[in-house]
Amino acid sequence: MNAKVVISKSLNKSTKATPLSVQLAIKTAEVRDSLSRIVKGLDGFFLQEDKNADRVDVLVLEIGNAPESEFQTISTLLQENVVETLFLTSAKMTPDILLPALRAGAKEFFQQPINKDEVAEAFQKVLLKARQSDQSDVTTTRSGKIFSVLGAKGGVGTTTFAVNLATSIQAQDKDKLVALVDMNILLGEVPLFLDLEAETDWEEIGKNFSRLDEAYLQSAMARHSSGVYVLPAPSKLEKETHLPAGFLFQLLRSMRRFFDYIVVDSGMIIDESYAKIFAESEAIYLVSILSLPCLINVRKLQESITATGVGKEKIRVIANRFEKRAQISPSEAAKIIGTDIGMTIPNNYSVAMSAINNGKTIPDMSGNSDVSRAYKKLAASLVDRAIERPGGVFRWFR
């Protein structure tokens, strides 16, 4: 009871703002009249009587005798951003109706006969969130930093680099929110490298993209013991899945509101969507080894990335598995690729393979090894540089 009073007091301070529109798609007259009276008695809302309105903030929809087709309509409304928040009601509250409704994007499900307090509390939560969002948009200017990781060839250690970079950044500051996103569509293996079971991948999130908020992401992403939130790639893309255009780019752009750092394992793919991601990245780590075939690929990839308009200064070439007595030295490699080697990571095969085979990070497997120190040094340089920049940070996941 006290919780409801607190919510109401908070909302009363915000009712001078633009009220939220509510539309009722209710077939049962008694239910429609009941909901209409409740909405009209709430501050901060108004009933949208125009059935041709382009968009409504809240839609209350009654599920009838054809739930499957109605759920299809629901998904379309949310994906097209015609409806911001969806509430459902039905005379039945069985699992075969409730679960598909929640998966389709419904925020609340009102059982009939309508409970006034239940409905009022649901609407109050929507209004409170809307007002808090308005305030956050005004007061918050900072967004999370994206670090993209790209491999020059298969087997050069791209995923190893991405995993250990993300976890090393998290180790530098436990209060930061760090995400690791596996966008390697063909060979996504991030969960295996962390011995992590993840139930949701980014394809599943794409099906519910309209629900992309802090609560949904928190429940969807798996969290590693290091503190890093992990979003895997789908094991196999479904042929009938129709993800929104530019979904991966929009996903990462949205995640910047929730995370301080986002490390992206891009695999070895460059297309229009990835080019946009590279453009918004703080740095693009191009992982290679000092072999001639890899270095030739590095040069080609640099040209492909800069051809999209991304500045060459963002690209940092990483020489992985580096040995001082290698046939090609860093200076010779620099002549081949046309730029300096940004960083070398020592070749410590036994430690790296032990970490992979045991589903652990390299610092966890051998914290004092030379390769572990290399990751810690890189992470420290990134965190220190970011701390110097002013601005607030969202703490919604806490």
Image: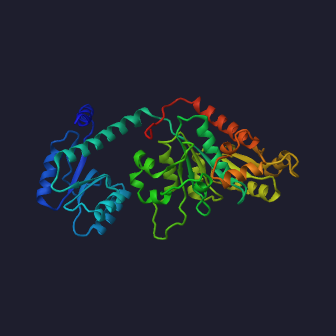
Q: Position of residue 276 (x, y in %)?
A: 57, 52
Q: Is residue 342 visible?
A: no
Q: Hey, which quadrant is residue 294 in on the image?
A: bottom right
Residue 190, x across and y down, in percent:
60, 54
Quadrant in the picture for the N terminus: top left
Q: Name the residue rendered at 16%, 52% in the picture.
A: 114
Q: Position of residue 193 (x, y in %)?
A: 62, 53
Residue drawn 24% across the image and 60% down it: 93
Where's the C terminus, which quadrant?
top left
Residue 20: image x %, image y %?
A: 26, 44
Q: Nearer the viewer, residue 186 or 191?
A: 191
Query: Residue at point 50% right, 31% down?
Result: 391
Against 34, residue 168 (above or below) is above
Give the camera-side residue of 302 and 151: 151
Left or right placement of residue 69 versus residue 389 in this view: left
| Residue at x 21%, y 47% (from the top left corner) | 118
Tell me which corner region of the image, top left, top right, bottom left or bottom right, holds residue 184: bottom right
Total marks in image: 0
